[in-house]
Image (cartoon, rainbow, N blue to C red):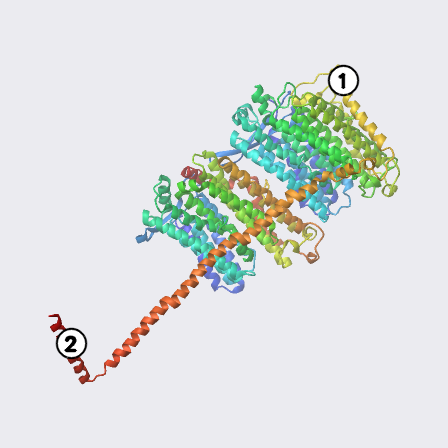
Amino acid sequence: MVGMITALILVPLVGALCVSAARPRQARGVALGFNALSAIIAFTLWRNFDSSAAGLQLIERYAWIPALGAEYLVGIDGLSLLLVLLTSLLFPFALLAQQGSRGLCALMLVMQSALYGTFTAQNFVLWFLFYEMSLIPSFLLIKLWGGEKRAHAATKFFLYTFLGSVAMLLAFLGLYFVHGTFDFARLAELGKTGLLTSNISWLAFAGIFVGLAVKVPLFPFHTWLPDAYETAPTGVAMVLTGTLSKMGVYGFVRLLLPLFPSEMRVVGPWLLGLAVCSIIFASLAAWAQTDLKRIVAYLSINHLGYCMLGLFAITARTAEPMVETQAALSGVFMQIFNHGITAATLFYYVGLLEQRRGARGLDDFGGLMQRAPLLCGWMSIAMFSSLGLPGLNGFVGEFLIFKGSFALAASFTAVAVLGLLITAIVFLRAMQALFSGPLAGSCSAFPELRPKEKLVLLPATLLMFAIGIAPQFIFNIFNTTVVQMAQLFA
Amino acid sequence: MTFSLVPSLWLIPAAPLVVSLLILSLKKSRHSASAMLAIFGQLVALGFSAAAFLQTLATPGFRVVHNFTWFSFGEQSLRIGWVLDPLTAAMLIMITFVALWIFVFSVGYMAGDEHFARFFAYLSFFTAAMLGVVIANSLLLLFVCWELVGIASYLLIGFWIHKPSAAAAAKKAFITTRIGDLGFFVGLLWLYGSSGTLLFYEEGRGCLESAALLAIGPSATAIALLIFCGAVSKSGQFPLHVWLPDAMEGPTPVSALIHAATMVAAGVFLVARVYPLFSMGGVVAGGVDPGHAGLSAAGYNGVTPSLTVVVWVGVITALMASLIALAQWDIKRILAYSTVSQLGLMMVSLGVGGVAVGVMHLLAHGFFKALLFLGAGSVIHSCQHEQDIRRMGGLRGMIPITLITYAVGMMALSGVPLFFAGAWTKEEILQATAHWPGSRVPHYLMMAGVVLTALYMTRQMIYVFFGRRHAASERAHESPRVMTLPLIVLAFCTIALSLLLTPAWPWLHEYLSGARAHFETARLIQPALLVSFALVAAGIGLGILIYRNPTERDPLEAAQPALFRFLENRMWLDEIYARTVIAFSRMAARLSDWMDRHVWDGLVRTVGGIARLFGDLNKGADERGINAAVDETTFGARDLGRVISAAHSGQVQTYLGAVGVGMLALLLLYAWLG
């Protein structure tokens, strides 16, 4: 089974080439075909993954640039696998969400390949290569296929995240010149033994932190996001929120927490404060929006804020009980997956509404329940999942995050809980505006959910229920990794 | 070891849940099929509940649990489970039975509604969620079902979704209850963190058992109060009661369900369930084993901070709501406020230590409040959907069954002695408050509450059934059999239940407290009993006296216009909230948006601007400085080149001349330096 991960990374790239060569009409079909192939590979990875074994698995290691100590090193642990699966799930979903030209499909596939690379690379040079590789297609996708103000939003998105990347690159170069390695595992060992602490460590920490905080995004580095998501076409917004934002969270787990435990501890309370700000201010700002896409975008920041809360709570305290660390970490991983599914689904629904009505303001709709009860019902499921209703997926992750963080950082968590209330207000307000009341004149010919759309939505909706009711199959993916990481962070 | 039902206790909520899903998958037009299915689901649940109930009769203080792992994360597992004890069993019977008759009533009441099938699906889901709350042996499972109850009520209150007021009421109910749920959630997290488990009972390791309670220690008070926040919002306690009267926007059977069997009962039930957490403070002081504090009121004398809060919240709620009820005109709104006040009464009872009594009142209230709401539904149905009691009147001869059954409910609610369920429980609550060591004030205020309750119910009765007829009541007609039958059954039960509640044979009390009942007539004759009966008589008598000639203008309004206005407008609490909390939150939202657009993004733009400024400066420096310098240098070199190249004329004479001059100059230099 050696070469599986490389195959996973290469398949979408080959797909991108084939799509470019295909007839315009067949572009999306070809892209979906390659998506299916990637999904099969990802699924095989899952089958071959030993969930009870700690450490990296299915490793592929080749010499690459010996002068730099940069190897081609890929491998997966529970977290990587989770993200690979999420990526494989979301890309076909996103492609089905919209009509795609050849260029769009090809760029999406390039992005998919970059994401697989990012989530499996275990060496900084390689990781950074993929990390940057994802940036260019997303920039182009927004710039070329976006809505109004796309040029501005795309440039802002690019410059913002690119500056973050530059900071991160400089930080890693600094680390390299002092310690002579780019290997994540070795750097983590150095970090744990405290050897990484040196004069430049604070600078390096700051550089990497900014780079990742922009990507997640963490308050106050988030202002590129609403603009970018608002203008991005539906499918692109889906993968941006579903997978690209996870690169930031992943980076926090993989790089910042293991490499800089002492630095994290020092600034921990401040970071927790930022996470709480992310949660509260983003949900409040979502409340003030009237554009559905912006609402979902802001709530995305809010939900990733919960992830950040869990991660920072783990590092903020010096002697934490392992139980709580494991709870918080499990919650964060769960939330990564759940948010990917739910937020992408919400964007899909917004896309449906926009497609039918030609607008997506809250005031542009009314009384949809009378015309399209199924659409309203299904969309409500996604909304309730997002607001953390028990029985649906969102609750499981948020509950564990809050459980862990409450024991580790009670006061911050108690404030963060308010986010749950505000999210509920935001969604209920949206539901009231969209679904209830008298039928708006402009929606009198509003079409019901079509069978094809139902088919596209079915997997995501089923997953919401499945994870909400019996989440064990997701926990099995990363339980061992959680235990291992909890020890690493202890 | 006999066969135990407990592992399959989940079937009780599962039956209505499955039914609900089945109905949703049916065609919209299959009205009778959906009603049949829903009623069948209730019957199954009722049958299982009865079986479970019979099992609890075997031994006093019966308690069997069934726990299992929901999921494992890291190296731990999260366990949930169900429990069967008298509290659960009694609640199960009440919920399934009352809900069953509400379902039957709905068949008539909702006939002709376009979304008949959906209505029954939601109703089934609602009872399923509530049954889940009752059987839960884990605070987490209870919270999960608790939230599902919330969502079901959201769907049902907003059932007539085309009405903007219904949509607004549904939203208000969900958000208001979620405010309290946040407290509940934090309490749950705290409890989980400090006791390491969320199971109530697990062979001595559960969070309500002695070992865990001792481990929790002093933080029990805070945890209990946080959990109480959830009960406050769900059970409509002050200051989060505002959603409950608005919930009238739902169809009347929904109101009956919310006010009797499900939803509001959940809060009182929650407090009763986690009672050991509330009584913790007292236990530490008094040194009683907390594990056995349980439901027994006898011998319990502790006044803990958390229970004191419960008492006062209950007192304020009960009194405030019964005052407001006095000045309402909507038949359902009056009942809604009576629910709020009765729930306050139950909280008081729990707070002063009368746990079993509080639960008994909850059970009895479930029967007669369902009866009253369905009766109100029947009245509204017969009056062409008129809800204002001023426009009814004189209905007594026209809807006899409704009148008689409604009267039974009214007397039970007011606490008319001997044959009505509410009377005995209310009387016992009064006694419990009398013995509360904390203060005598709640006792006196609750006595006032009893008078007020009798008073506003008499007012309602007179306005609706007596006096002159009005437009709405001119053509009134009795409701169909399918609607009157539930009324008769519930009225009958209200009376029959009173037999289990008498002090002579306090069967239900002893059942709930885990003891055996003994028959003793002597206990019937107590002075305290006479006092509470006198209070009820006073209330009703006063009511007849004041409202004997029902007029458009309320006699109270004539006497005290300002006070009446204050009460009629529900003490302006909604308006106060709108101007303060809600306005403040809205402002915070707008501020966040503004900050995002102008401050944080402004910061980014500033940084970008500075970078651009540097770029411009750089450009300027490039063009005028470096570039110019390079230009100057090159131009200079070129000019120099021109000058020099002019010298390269190619004429040997000039060269030789130059050489000669040079040599001469060198010689001169040499001579001078030498």
Identify the residue at image location x=64%, y=33%: B231
Are labels 2 and 1 on one chain?
yes
Q: Which quadrant is home to the C terminus of chain A? A: top left
Do we see residue B119 in this rendering? Answer: yes
**Which residue occupies the extreme front position in the image?**
B672
Where residue B114 appears, as percent x and y from the top left, is 74, 47
Q: In the structure shown, which secondary structural element does the residue marked by tag 2 occupy?
A: helix
Q: Residues within 10 Å of mark 2 (few under 14, many from 20)?
A: few
Left or right position of B124 against A76: right
Q: Is residue A24 above or below residue B25?
A: below
Identify the residue at image location x=83%, y=27%: B541
Mark 1: amino acid: Pro
Residue denoted by label 2: B665
Residue denoted by label 1: B527
Mark 2: amino acid: Ala
Q: Is residue A144 above or below residue A124?
A: below
Q: In the structure shown, which secondary structural element does the residue marked by tag 1 occupy?
A: helix
